[in-house]
Image (cartoon, rainbow, N blue to C red):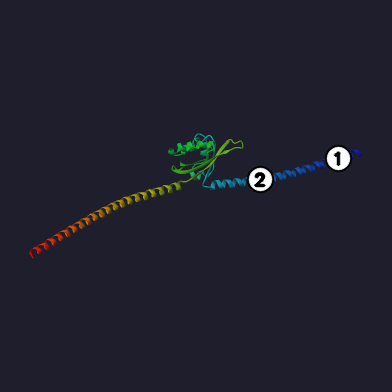
Amino acid sequence: VLGVSVLFGLVLMRQLAVVNENSLLAEQLREELAERKIAEQLLQLNQERMKFLLSATPAVIYTASVQGRENSRHTFVSDNARVVFGHAPSAFTTEPGFWSSHVHPEDLSEVSGQWLDIAQGERFVHEYRFLTGDGRYCWVRDEARLIRNRAGQAAEIVGYWTDVTMRKQMERALHKANEELESRVQARTVELSRANASLLREIEERGRAEQALRESEARSRAISELISDFAFSVRVEAN
């Protein structure tokens, strides 16, 4: 009987230990679930914040492979591409050659050539015309840089587009105004040159006239003196 009681006590203690252990595990599980829920909530909050920032900023964020964009697809384009360019982000990431087919033909060769340099670690900064969803060309400033992994190998390209059409229009207007001003200055310079030439001619003519007048006055004085001398000599002879 004593042995049975001892065995029963040991079993009971073991069950109590299991219950305590299970309670601890349950408590740890509840804590882990609570922490995971908080982490998920924070992650969702951060994602919402990031989504808001990407949609609110005027810059369209993108990532692309290091092979170049002419034949490859972008791997990510932020949602505000719809607002800035009038194109769905999926068009950039799923349609091969979408980007290159929308760059202005006069700009594509130069832009593509400079884009290849980024694979060598060069920073890419270029401005070109891009066809929007409504059929017009807007001016885009494209800045990108190469991202490397921990091994130092090229991983991907991260960049952003901004619409600089208004700035380009202001630059053209300012350039046109400067050209018009320069044209007016040149025209005024020609007018002044002509006026100066005319004034110089007038001064030269006046100088010649004054010289002729002085010479005429000198001749008149000489004649007057000659006449006076002749009259004096006649009176002398008459006396």
Q: Quadrant of residue 153?
A: top right
Toward the viewer: 212 or 72? Answer: 212
Relative to 24, is 7 on the left or the right? right
Q: Which mark is residue 39?
A: 2
Give how far across and how far down residue 16 sits, in percent: 82, 42
Residue type of the residue flagged with mark 2: Ala
Name the residue nearer the viewer: 173 or 38.
Answer: 173
Q: Position of residue 128 (x, y in %)?
A: 46, 41
Q: CA distance from mark 1 to mark 2?
A: 42 Å
- Counting from the top left corner in percent of width and height, residue 227 is at 13, 61
> Identity of the amino acid at label 1?
Leu
Q: Residues within 10 Å of mark 1 (few under 14, many from 20)?
A: few
Question: Closer to the N terminus: mark 1 or mark 2?
Answer: 1
Q: Quadrant of residue 155?
A: top right
> Which residue is found at the position 58% from the left and 46% from the top?
50
Q: Which residue is mark 1?
A: 10
